[in-house]
Image: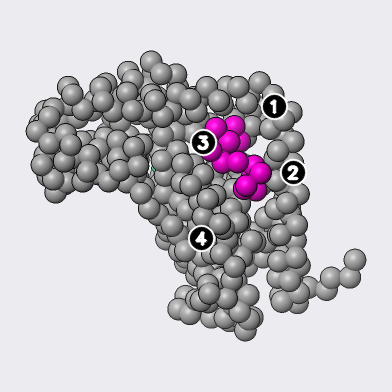
Amino acid sequence: MTDTTPTSALPNANFTRRVFSGIQPSGNLTLGNYLGALKRFAQKQDEGIETIYCLVDMHAITVWQDPEKLRRATREAAAAFIASGVDPSKSILFNQSQVGAHAELGWLLNCVARLGWMNRMTQFKDKAGKNAEKASLGLYAYPALMAADILLYHTTEVPVGDDQKQHVELTRDIAAKFNHDYGVEFFPAPEPVIEGAATRVMSLRDGSKKMSKSDPSDASRINLTDDADTIAKKIRKATTDAEPLPETIDGLKDRAEAKNLVNIYAALSDRTAADVVAEYAGQGFGTFKPALADLAVAQLAPISGEMNRLMQDPAEIDRILGKGAAQADAIARPILEKTYEIMGMVRSR
Ligand code: TYM
């Protein structure tokens, strides 16, 4: 056993390509979740690869959740996936707690991950803040559960926003250490897939902060449940500078708020930021913001409408999640059993 990070990762050529990703069902999903994750999840379905998407309710409880609100938020997040184009007949869609193998592999990987690695996780530092002594043990161990989520399916690709890159890299380290310590070639080294124009959508009030469902200011974000008027109003009121848009994206370098709005426009319209800047060069926000508001309303209002419709029938959502969980379990169980066997556990029932 070593305490150092092994450098060898298994070539993923040995594994069938498989996509896995997850979202926490804790409160309103935002435009950041949509552009950084949901929209891209739907696109991945058409690449001829198996796609598995998970509502990570066991991650959500690393900070206190009111049980009724968590149940509702889980169904609402499932509705958001489907309304964003994730089709339960093409992708496996389920909530994490219905597949017990996640928690089981999570424990096994707690025993592989090193404290030194966990101490480097910036998201723990951000979330625990100054009061880390009062944070739950689960919040600290969370990245090892995330590694389990991914490795349980021998995942090769993990589409995420920029903020999750460090956790996927940790997953690679955990996989490599497991393979090294047990002398096996069992877990692949999953690749973080961070692509598109909006891998880090920033707050509408402060271009140095990530757009987040936990920001106390509702004006800082667009929620997927916002109606057309609210979306348009939040964009019109977004903080910007007084300069017109530059000729090229280099001119956005020190203009975080302007850059954010351009990136959002680009991601919503499936264009590059360079393309958008070229179109609006020399124009002020008096022109750009209404154009962005129209685009955002056209793209997002149908999603919130469809979410509302789906939420009228929670039993149907639960049925979809249950079916997805059974499909996920069928892939996960044999991989978990093999992990137990590799680690030396007697399995006799
Ligand atoms: P979570 O729930 O915070 O976010 C879900 C996804 O949305 C992306 N995202 C953003 N992308 C761009 N701009 C933003 N402002 C923004 N905010 C959020 C996140 O990068 C993420 O892709 N630990 C994960 C959930 C998780 C997971 C996994 C992900 C658990 N197990 C296994 C992948 C694979 C999380 O808290 O994401």
Of residues 250 and 46, the one nearer the viewer is 46
Quadrant location of the C terminus in the rendered image: bottom right
Label 2 residue near ligand 1, CB within 8 Å: no
Mark nearer the N terminus (2 vs 4): 4
Residue shown at 44%/33% (left/top)? 30
How far is mark 2 from mark 4, CA to CA? 23 Å
Left or right of 319, for residue 88: left
Compute the Cα span from label 3 to label 4: 20 Å
User: Which sits earlier in the primary sequence, circle 1 or circle 3?
Assistant: 3
Q: Do the residues labelled 3 and 4 touch (CB within 8 Å)?
A: no
307 on left or right of 205: right
**Earlier residue among tags 3 and 4:** 3
Q: Could you tell me residue 219's position as x and y percent? A: 35, 24
Residue type, mark 2 in image: Lys
* Residue 35: percent from left, percent from top: 41, 40
Residue bearing the label numbered 3: 84
Residue 91 within the magenta-colored segment of the rendering: yes
| Crowding at mark 3 (Cα within 10 Å: few <14, some 14-19, many 20+) | many
Crowding near the residue tagged with mark 1, few <14, some 14–19, many ≥20 C-alpha atoms within 10 Å: some
CA gap, disc 1 and disc 4: 31 Å
Depth order, front residue of 64/188: 188
Q: What colouring method underlies this structural image?
A: one colour
Q: In which quarter of the image is the N terminus?
A: bottom right
Label at residue 157? 4
Residue beneath disc 1: 314
Number of numbered discs overlaid on the protein picture? 4
Q: Which is in the foreground here, disc 1 or disc 3?
A: 3
Cα separation between marks 2 and 3? 19 Å
Q: Which mark sits nearer the N-terminus, 1 or 4?
A: 4
